[in-house]
Image (spheres, rainbow, N blue to C red):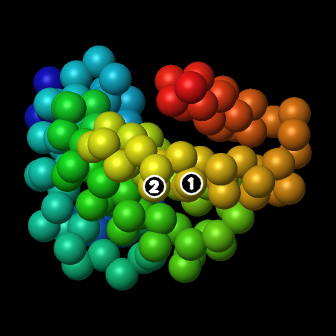
Amino acid sequence: ENDAADRLNAEAHRGLGRDNPEVLYSEIDRAASVVETDPNAALDILTRLWPRMAQCTDGNTRSSYIDMMACVLGALGRPREALIFSAQSIELGTAHLGPESAITLGRISNHAQFLLLVGRVDEGRSMLAELLATQTRVLGADHDDTHNTKRHLDRLSALSA
């Protein structure tokens, strides 16, 4: 199944070259499409992609790869490892997309969740509180992401009460 997808992907990007950021990103996207149903398959895709990603100089593509690795590790129940990748993802996302882009804010949210999963509750709560203030200012109080962050904070408050 993966071999057929690899052949199809290669055919679709024949003129671009295997290491073109667009080709690399399409393979990251393929991992994203299976992470919920088969995180092991997503990890396999990303692991096979690593030798080419290591040579990639496109910051957005590298950032997307690292973010997807964090998501896959989180889905596999490996939040400590996911935390390492998510921190790198935020750093690269901030540098290439800006600190207030919706993508960077989403990565901050994921990082806060990983902090909570590894028991660093105060750090996670603090990060979520800062994120909520930024989301409210940048995305608006009625945005779905803003509502989700507020719900997470409300649940944390209820648990600690």
Amino acid type of the residue that numbered disc 2 sits on in the rendered structure: Glu
Q: Please give the name of the residue rendered at 18% of the width and 40% of the height, measured from the top-left corner.
A: 78
Q: Position of residue 107 (x, y in %)?
A: 51, 52
Marks 2,1: beta carbons within 8 A: yes
Q: Please give the name of the residue rendered at 51% of the width and 29% of the height, measured from the top-left corner.
A: 160
Q: Residues within 10 Å of mark 1 (few under 14, many from 20)?
A: few
Say the numbered circle drawn on residue 13. none
Q: Please give the name of the residue rendered at 55% of the width and 55% of the height, measured from the top-left corner.
A: 127
Say the numbered circle drawn on residue 123. 2
Left or right of 116: which side holds 78? left
Amino acid type of the residue that numbered disc 1 sits on in the rendered structure: Ser
Identify the secondary structure beneath mark 2: helix
Determine which quarter of the picture holds residue 118: top left
Determine which quarter of the picture holds residue 21: bottom left
Q: Mark 1 highlights which residue?
A: 126
Position of 77 relative to 79 (above/below): above
Q: CA distance from mark 2 to mark 1?
A: 5 Å
In this view, the residue in front, 110 or 161, is: 161
